[in-house]
Image: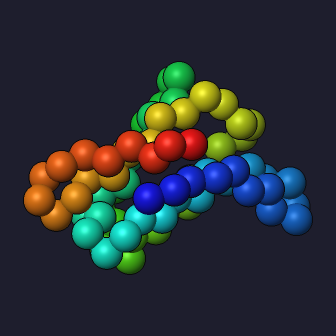
C-alpha cells in the first residue's frame, strides 16, 4: 500500500491511498480526525483542508495490519 497528497486544480487537498488486492480496509488518522472505511476497490480519497501529519494503515484479508513506508 502507498499514499500521497494531491491538490485538485480548484485547490482542494486530498490524501490518496491505495493497496494490493489483499487490502480490505484503509484507515487514515490525523491530529483531530480519522477515516476508517471498507475498501472493496482498494482505494481511498479523503479531502482535507491542509496537509497535516497523518498515519495510514491497511487491514488485510487475513486480519494483519500494514503501514506504508511513507
Q: Outermost residue toward the left?
A: 62
Report the colour scheme: rainbow
Q: Nearer the viewer, residue 66 or 30?
A: 66
Q: How many marks?
A: 0
Task: Please state which of residues 34 and 23 is positioned toward the viewer in this rendering.
Answer: 23
Residue 19 higher or lower than 55, as above or below: below
Instruction: Classify residue 7 by image quadrant.
Output: bottom right
In this view, the residue in front, 37 or 16, is 16
Q: Up-down: is 22 above or below 16?
A: below
Seen in the image, is 13 located left or right of residue 25?
right
Q: Residue at x 46, y 47 (%)?
A: 68
Q: Is residue 17 depicted above or below 49 in this figure?
A: below
> Residue 22 vs residue 34: left or right?
left
Q: Find residue 34 and report its horizontal and vertical position in percent.
A: 43, 37
Q: Quadrant of the N terminus?
A: bottom left
Q: Quadrant of the C terminus?
A: top right
Residue 25, quarter of the rendered image: bottom left
Residue 36 appears in the figure? no
Residue 48 at x, y = what percent?
Answer: 65, 44
Taking 3 as reference, is 39 above or below it? below
Q: Is residue 67 visible?
A: yes
Furthest-front residue in view? 69
Residue drawn 25% across the image and 53% down it? 59
Amino acid at each position: 500500500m502507498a499514499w500521497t497528497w494531491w491538490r485538485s486544480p480548484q485547490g482542494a487537498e486530498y490524501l490518496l491511498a491505495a493497496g494490493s488486492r489483499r487490502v480490505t480496509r484503509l484507515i487514515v488518522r490525523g491530529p483531530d480526525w480519522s477515516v476508517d472505511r471498507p475498501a472493496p476497490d482498494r482505494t481511498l480519497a479523503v479531502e482535507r483542508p491542509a496537509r497535516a501529519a497523518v498515519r495510514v494503515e491497511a487491514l488485510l484479508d487475513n486480519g494483519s495490519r500494514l503501514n506504508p513506508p511513507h
